[in-house]
Every structure is written in C-alpha cells, then in structure tokens.
Image: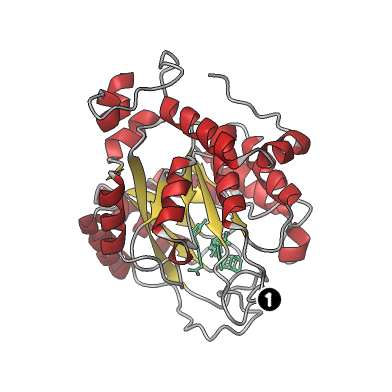
Amino acid sequence: MTLRHDWSYEEVARLLEQPLMDLVFEAQRLHRQHFAPNQVQTSTLLSIKTGACPEDCKYCPQSGHYNTGLDKEKLIEVEKVLKQASKAKEAGATRFCMGAAWKHPSRKDMPYVIEMVKGVKAMGLETCMTLGMLQPEQADALAEAGLDYYNHNLDTSPEYYRSIITTRSFQDRLDTLDHVRKSGMKICSGGILGMGETQNDRAGLLVSLANLKPHPESVPINQLVAVPGTPLEDADPIDPFDFIRTIAVARIMMPESHVRLSAGRENMSDEMQALAFLAGANSIFYGEKLLTTSNPDADADRLLFKRLGIEPEPLAASAHCSKPDETLPESAPVSPQSPLFYDACEAQA
Ligand code: SAM
Ligand code: DTB
Ligand code: SF4
C-alpha cells in the first residue's frame, strides 16, 4: 500500500464530514490490514520534572504563566525513575515515557536524562521522552543512549497555533521533529482536541502530521483535560463523535502508525473508548497518572480490555509490525479462529 504525504485541507475537511459509520468502517478495514485487530499498545508516563515551565501553552497545568496550584518539582533522581519504570513493567506496560516541563533540556540536565534512558532501556522496556525542543546534537545523544521514541506534539493546526502558544512557533516544533528524525529515533507526535478549534483546524493538524515523511510512528490524540487556572479551563468540550471522527481520519491517513487514545480517557465512557478502538486507536497511556493529572486505574483498564477481548500488544509484535507485508489481503479475516486474531504479525511473516 502506498502511503500518502500530499493531503490537502479540503479533502481532509471533507473526510471529517463523512457519515460516522462510513468513517469508522473504513478506518477499521485499514486497521486490520496493518495491525492485529484486538491488540492495544500500552505506555506508562512519568513526569521527571514538573511545573514552572517558561512556555505559555494555554492548555497546560505546568506552564509557569498560570496558577494551577501544582506542586513543582526539579528533575527527579535517576533511581526514582528506574523504580517507577520497574513498577510500570510489572503492571504490564511495554513503553515508559518520561516527560519534563522544559522549553528545552539544558546542558547540565542532559547527563541525567541520558542515564535515565540507559537504565530504562536495560530493563527491556521501550523508551520515550518528551523534553521540549532539541538541538540536533541533543537528539543524536539521546538516540545514541537508546531512546526509541521522542514525543513532540504539533498540538493543533499551524493557523490556530498562535492562539494557543505564543512563546514558540509551529516551525520550531517542525524543526525539532526534523532533528529527531535525522537522529534515527522514532517520532511520537499528535495533538489536542477540544481547545476551541474548528474542524478545519483538526484537518490542518492531521495534514501537518500526515504530510511528514515518513509518518510519525506514534500519533497521540489527546482530549483536552481542562485544568482550573489554565486559560482553557472553560473551553467547550468537543462533540464526542467529532473526536471519534478525528481518530478515524488519523487512522485512514496514517494506516501504519499507532494512533494513541491519549489524555482525557477519564472523561470518556467505556463505550466511547471502545468506539475509539473501533475507529483505529491502538495505543493508550496505562497507569493511574498522566503527567500531573489522573488517568484511569490500571485495574479499570485491564477490566476494560478483558470485556472488549483486547490484549496488550506484546513488544515483539510492535517491533515486527512496523514493516507490514504488502501481500496482506484487502480485508483481513476477523474470526477468532484466524491466526490474525492472535498475532497479525506472525501471519505477515
Ligand atoms: N514540555 C514538553 C513539550 O511541550 O513538548 C513536554 C511535556 S508536554 C506536557 C507534552 C504534551 O502534553 C503537550 O504537547 C500536550 O500535547 C500534552 N498536554 C499538556 N497538557 C494537556 C492537557 N491539559 N490536556 C491534554 N493534553 C495536554
Ligand atoms: C501526549 O500526547 N500526551 C501526554 C504525553 N504526550 C506526554 C501528556 C498528557 C498530559 C495531560 C496533562 C497532565 O497530566 O499534565
Ligand atoms: Fe511547558 Fe510542555 Fe506544558 Fe507547554 S506543554 S507549558 S512546553 S510543559
């Protein structure tokens, strides 16, 4: 299957307007060509440096520009990080994502961050970090240390960006993504819905992500967690069906990427989450906390997976699935008897 990188706003805006059932059906059809239909990747997040961030992102409880009553914390010790990573592994996560409320990492912080990457990697977990902007040599150093993914979200359309963040530009974000790509790390980049953006802005976000070549391997779609004290605390929530539409269109535009149902799951019913998985979401943040806000309990997610017949995606499968076989049938079999039901990647091999 040829992946496209030439999407226009108009065609994506038109896609977003399609009947929901058509979109979800097409998204699921494509999903089954590339992924095991009942597997969801699980990542656990940890804030390694909290609050007092110099950036003014209007959605963020960690920005130093707003008073959200958050307990600030300096860069935490490597040992603490490794302890949390070990707990996440025991609970069944396969990727550990470390986030820092920085504009960019400083020279003095880099050695500690590198130690964290090496330690987490040595535990057999996939590693991910989100530390703000990177210089090319910082990206190279992280890649060298064993960092698998770098998360750096575009957040919204280029047109709406200035209404949400004024302390950096959309181009700054693209520049960091370019450095990450050139360093050889995988890209995790997505956005936030429910910030007062229009459907055209959602199209603009998806176009900006899908026109990156190659596509980001991981695409987190966050629903705004409206935190009191942030300028977006009273933002009108997104229509849940428009949220699902956006997930489905992300799946259709980036069929080989993991699409993550990210922040905001606490405000979603089990049925809404099931619909998001049907629309092609196949990754979640797993564990009671995101960075500073809460996430569903691991127990609740295990129960949800069980009720839906979903299994956590094993590490080997995610690595193997990154190069899908072009000989897979148009519509993959769905019966539980099918080998695809258990391991689509085995079927592709
Ligand atoms: N400071 C770094 C940066 O901005 O790239 C890394 C940490 S930052 C908290 C990572 C991402 O979290 C943001 O890009 C944004 O997409 C997401 N995020 C932050 N606050 C959020 C909120 N209230 N609701 C949903 N997503 C949020
Ligand atoms: C992403 O797209 N969402 C995560 C992660 N990448 C770093 C962060 C969500 C943060 C939600 C607000 C908080 O907990 O502070
Ligand atoms: Fe800082 Fe990241 Fe929050 Fe923006 S999103 S204020 S850069 S921590």
Q: Give neighbour class at mark 1: few <14, some 14-19, many 20+ (Cα, 10 Å).
A: some
Residue at x 42% of width, y 23% of height: 324
- Disc 1 residue type (three-letter): Pro
Q: Image check: 249 left or right of 148?
A: right
29 and 201: which one is in front?
Answer: 29
The reply to whether residue 185 is visible in this rendering is no
Write down the quadrant of residue 38 in the picture. Answer: top left
Q: Residue at x 27, y 59 (%)?
A: 88
Which of these two is toward me, 82 or 229? 229
Residue drawn at 48 percent across, 74 percent down: 50
Could you tell me how many numbered marks the image carries? 1
Query: How far across and down, in percent of the image, does residue 87 sit?
Result: 24, 62
In this picture, residue 69 sits left or right of residue 39: right
Above or below, 332 against 287 in this view is above
Residue 172 position within the rendered picture, expressed as x and y whole percent measured from the top left: 70, 53
In the picture shown, does residue 62 fall above or below 277?
A: below
- Secondary element type, mark 1: loop
- Colour logic: secondary structure
The residue positioned 78% from the left and 36% from the top of the image is: 10
* Residue that mark 1 sits on: 231
Residue 113 rendering spot, x and y as whole percentages:
42, 60
Q: Is residue 101 left or right of residue 143?
A: right
On screen, residue 235 versus residue 255, left or right, reads right
Is any part of residue 18 visible from this angle? yes
- Image quadrant for the C terminus? top left
Q: Is disc 1's CB within 8 Å of ligand 1?
A: no
Which quadrant of the figure has residue 299? Answer: bottom left
Q: Nearer the viewer, residue 194 or 214?
A: 194
On the image, the x and y values in percent for residue 24 come to 53, 38
